[in-house]
Image (cartoon, rainbow, N blue to C red):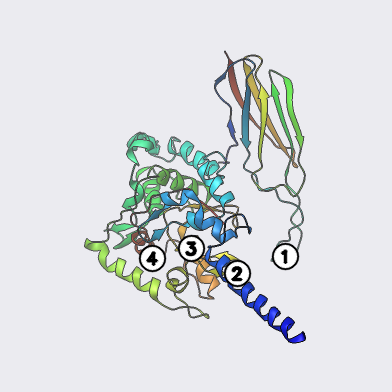
Amino acid sequence: MRHTIKVAFVALFVFGLALGNFSSTGVKAAGMEKMTETDKRAKDPRNKNYRVGDKASGYVYMTSQTRDMQDDDFSNPAFTWVDLGESLWKKVQGSAGKSCFSCHNSASFSMKGAANNFPRYDSNRKRLISLQHKINDELTKKMGAKKWKWESTNMLGMAAYIKLQSRGKPVTVQIGGKAKPFFEKGKKFFNQRRGLLDMACKHCHVDNAGNMARSNVLSEAQVNGFPTYRFKWQKPGSLHRRFIGCNKNIRAKPYKRGSEEYTNLELYMAWRSSGLKWETPAVRN
Amino acid sequence: MARKPRVKVPKSAKKGDVILIKTLAPHKMETGQRKNKKTGKKIPRLIINKFDVTFNGKEVVSADLHPAIAANPYLAFNYRVVESGTFKFVWTDDKGKTVTVEKSLKAG
């Protein structure tokens, strides 16, 4: 008697294991068990617009609540910065008595696709420049105004406003010509181990994309949503700020915003995102 | 240059219709619980504590806000359209600073 009970237990146990396996592969009928958060994210019907080939935008890795915020321009908090950028576009500033509008006219027309032009080679500096460098060049050289700090409210607003005009267009950056050696440097940076943890960007964002790093899902590090509103920051931030955060996480000494290293990396990462649609300003956690 | 609140009111609506009005005010909403990491001193509370909406001078919505409300408070409410007029949205923060936005509505 005792023996049979034992056998029954073992049988039950094995059966349970089998069931467990089934549920994890998703064979079990829907509704029998609550969907996990990861499943929910993977099965969101909105995903198809944010996947191109084997690439997936960071959108795919966000919770449905975060996606809702991004989908509705009103609830997207970054748009208060965009509104500011819009008003700055038409604001006359500097000694030349000009605004962006006086030369470029309406941004919705002139800045369409401008996000794809950066980073690009600048013959004066003999290095790559980002959109932020370009904005400051325009401010100081053409308008006679003071330049903005990289992470200032004005700069974030203007960068987001300009990149917003390219929203929905696929990312296509130019990596040939004079930008080529800088692109290679950026690529090297991405694959170079660094910091106390001795990790490269690729170890998280290529090899482990979709896995958890503590409580966060690692994304593929696609840059089509920057400047991005992050809940952690409670404000939008530039891509270079994100680089600094990542570098600190692996206990590496970060470079400065706008530094050559980060601008090279920005070009390589923009190239990695080729084909995905611009989402600026995206909402991420 | 400070950021301005966002307010979404339909330009026109039929009389008797119920419309959804959305507002989002950019604000840090400092709770008063956080400490300055370097000095160890508490950062004083600074939140939007009052939100008022009037339509043609008549009160529509009035809300008292408290700490634990997230930064950039998003507030939305329904409104039944009676007549044409102007909405006046006022946010007041702990320092007594107010931000006002006006939006007109045409009832047809």
Circle 1: residue type: Thr
Give the alpha-carbon distance from disc 4 to disc 1, as whole Å. 35 Å
In the rendered structure, the answer to whether residue A116 lies left or right of residue B66 reads: left
Q: Mark 3, chain letter? A: A
Q: Are marks 3 and 2 in contact (CB under 8 Å)?
A: no
**Most foreground residue, A270 or B88:** A270
Residue drawn at (44%, 35%), measured in percent from left and top?
A: A92
Query: Disc 2 marks which residue?
Result: A19
Q: Mark 4, chain letter? A: A
Label 4: which secondary element: helix
Give the alpha-carbon distance from disc 1 to disc 2, as whole Å. 56 Å
Q: Quadrant of the C terminus of chain A?
A: bottom right
Circle 2: residue type: Leu
Q: Is residue B55 above or below residue A209?
A: above
In the rendered structure, the answer to whether residue B24 lies left or right of residue A229 reads: right
What label does residue A265 carry, if any?
4
Question: Which numbered disc flags the more N-terminal residue, 4 or 3?
Answer: 3
Give the alpha-carbon distance from disc 3 to disc 2, as whole Å. 30 Å
Label 1: which secondary element: loop
Circle 3: residue type: Ser
Mark whose residue sits in front, 1 or 2? 2
Query: Disc 1 marks which residue?
Result: B39
Q: Is residue A282 visible?
A: no
Mark whose residue sits in front, 1 or 3? 3
